[in-house]
């Protein structure tokens, strides 16, 4: 009996154990299922997040690609702009004009499909001066090595002045005994020139200029020492090859660092091959054959200065975006001539002796501003101080230091990669300066 009870107890215990084991197993299975579902849900969320990140990366890549193409176009545009006036140390070809003056080679856009491009890295070898419209006689930039610039130009100069001379004496302040000589001068000058510039090196440039001068002067006056009551017009003309000039320019500083200018030094030599003032006959006033009288004016106008001269100069260009400031200093030394004489009317000769012109100090200052990729304008002022002339080591009577000042405005248009049009207009600021100067230059690079 007790044995049966023991067996029943054991059986009951076994059944309970099996039931408990099954319950535990069922509980563990439910927990594993929940954990698996959570893992699947987490993986799905991770896949969704990664998809969003991939889409964001795609958009970013597309934006960067567009930005890359924009930078590439800007780089090509900048290279094309630099062809207008490159710096002397660069290899590109000059786009005439400058100076003012460093034309460069035509920029070529790289093929990005085969050539890797480093965006944001500037080419170290091409340090170029900014383009400016040339308004002064000295260009501001140089011609690159091996390049040649041919520059035809035409300049028109007009000036007028009045002179009053009292020949006699006064008895009282309101009464003059003698003659009043009143003269009005009107001068018109056309100077056509052909200038060639060649880049010997990236820092050295040679220049040769051959001008052709055509002058016409009109003098309105009454003959002195006569009782004429009518005005006379005395017209004179002169034309021919003017004084040939040769120059050498060297770039001293290239303006690589900020706030430092480009500096170009130059040395210009001017010959005296043009017909000078001592070679043209003069209408005599007194001591003429037969006691004839005249106006004392030249019967033919000279087209040359009559003196050899040498002019050292320095030119500065300082970029300050969006403007470019430029200026220069110069000094002109004229060599003396010995045993000078001139011919007057009827073959008479007047001996003048030794003649030495005064030195000329010059300075100019201006500002250039680019309007767009093809055009720019400049505004500036130049001043020259001309010393007194000596004759036989004595100052000529009536010779004084003369101040010449002009205000200039210039415009430059790049017609093509090789041709530029420069136009400048000058207005005189002093009585001794020409009233109007109009200059047109068309530099062409080869």
Image (spheres, rainbow, N blue to C red):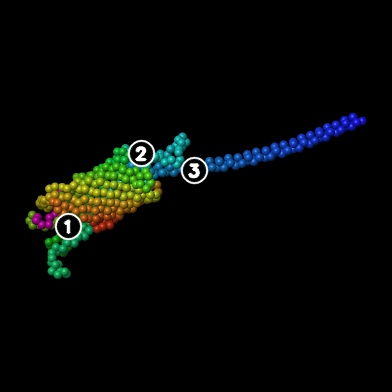
Q: Who's the residue at 35% across and 47% down the image?
A: 260
Mark 2 to mark 3: distance in Å?
A: 29 Å
The residue under label 2 is 91
Query: Mark 2: which secondary structure?
Result: loop
- Residue at image coords 40%, 47%: 373
Residue 284 belongs to the span the image colors magenta:
yes
Observer-nearest of 144 and 164: 144
Q: Going from the N terminus, do you reach mark 1 or mark 3 first?
A: 3
**Numbered range of the magenta stretch:** 279-288
Closer to the camera in the image, 126 or 106: 126
Q: Which mark is residue 398?
A: 1
Q: What whole-number distance in Å separates the C-alpha atoms at marks 1 and 3? A: 71 Å
Q: Which residue is mark 3?
A: 67
Tell me: residue 171, above or below residue 151.
Answer: below
Residue at the front extreme? 2
Judged from the image, the secondary structure of the residue bearing numbered disc 1 is: loop
- Residue 211: % across, % down: 24, 46
Classify 10 Å Cα crowding around label 3: few (below 14), some (14-19), many (20 and above).
few
Who's the residue at 24% across and 49% down the image? 331
Residue in the foreground of this view, choosing between 23 and 246: 23
Asked whether the residues under the numbered discs 2 and 3 touch, taking CB atoms below 8 Å apart as contact, a structural biologist would say no
Of residue 182 and residue 238, the one placed in the foreground of this image is 182
> Residue 427 colored magenta?
no
Residue 423 seen in render: no
Quadrant (top left, top right, bottom left, bottom right) of the C terminus:
top left
The answer to whether one can see residue 43 in this image is yes
Pinpoint residue 320: horizontal percent, then vertical percent.
38, 49
CA gap between label 2 and label 1 equals: 53 Å
> Which residue is the extreme one toward the top?
3
On-image quarter of the N terminus: top right
């Amino acid at each position: 009996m007790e044995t049966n009870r023991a067996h029943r107890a054991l059986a009951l215990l076994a059944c309970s154990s099996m039931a408990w084991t099954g319950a535990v197993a069922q509980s563990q299975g439910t927990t594993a299922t929940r954990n698996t579902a959570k893992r699947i849900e987490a993986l799905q969320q991770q896949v969704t997040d990664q998809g969003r990140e991939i889409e964001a990366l795609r958009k970013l890549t597309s934006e960067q690609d567009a930005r890359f193409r924009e930078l590439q176009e800007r780089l090509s545009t900048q290279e094309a702009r630099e062809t207008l006036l490159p710096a002397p140390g660069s290899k590109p070809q000059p786009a005439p004009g400058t100076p003012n003056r460093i034309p460069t080679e035509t920029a070529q856009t790289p093929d990005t499909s085969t050539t890797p491009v480093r965006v944001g890295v500037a080419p170290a070898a091409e340090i170029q001066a900014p383009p400016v419209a040339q308004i002064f006689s000295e260009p501001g930039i140089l011609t690159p090595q091996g390049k040649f610039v041919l520059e035809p130009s035409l300049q028109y100069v007009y000036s007028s002045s009045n002179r009053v001379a009292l020949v006699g004496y006064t008895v009282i302040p309101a009464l003059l005994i003698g003659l009043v000589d009143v003269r009005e001068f009107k001068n018109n000058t056309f100077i056509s020139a052909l200038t060639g510039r060649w880049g010997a090196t990236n820092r050295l440039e040679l220049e040769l200029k051959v001008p052709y001068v055509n002058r016409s002067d009109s003098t309105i006056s009454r003959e002195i020492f006569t009782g004429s009551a009518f005005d006379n017009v005395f017209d004179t003309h002169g034309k021919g090859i003017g004084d040939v000039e040769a120059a050498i320019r060297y770039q001293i500083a290239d303006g690589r660092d900020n706030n430092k200018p480009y500096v170009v030094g130059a040395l210009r030599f001017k010959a005296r091959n043009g017909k000078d003032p001592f070679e043209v006959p003069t209408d005599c006033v007194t001591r003429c054959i037969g006691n004839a009288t005249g106006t004392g004016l030249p019967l033919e106008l000279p087209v040359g200065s009559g003196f050899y001269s040498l002019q050292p100069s320095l030119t500065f260009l300082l970029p300050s975006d969006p403007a470019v400031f430029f200026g220069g200093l110069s000094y002109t030394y004229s060599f003396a001539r010995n045993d000078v004489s001139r011919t007057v009317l009827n073959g008479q000769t007047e001996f003048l002796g030794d003649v030495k012109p005064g030195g000329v100090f010059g300075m100019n200052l201006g500002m250039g501003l680019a309007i767009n990729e093809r055009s720019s304008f400049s505004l500036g002022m130049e001043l020259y101080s001309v010393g007194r002339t000596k004759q036989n080591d004595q100052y000529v009577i009536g010779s004084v230091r003369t101040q010449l000042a002009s205000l200039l405005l210039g415009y430059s248009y790049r017609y093509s990669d090789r041709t530029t049009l420069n136009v400048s207009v000058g207005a005189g600021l002093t009585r001794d300066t020409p009233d109007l100067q109009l200059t047109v230059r068309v530099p062409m690079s080869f």
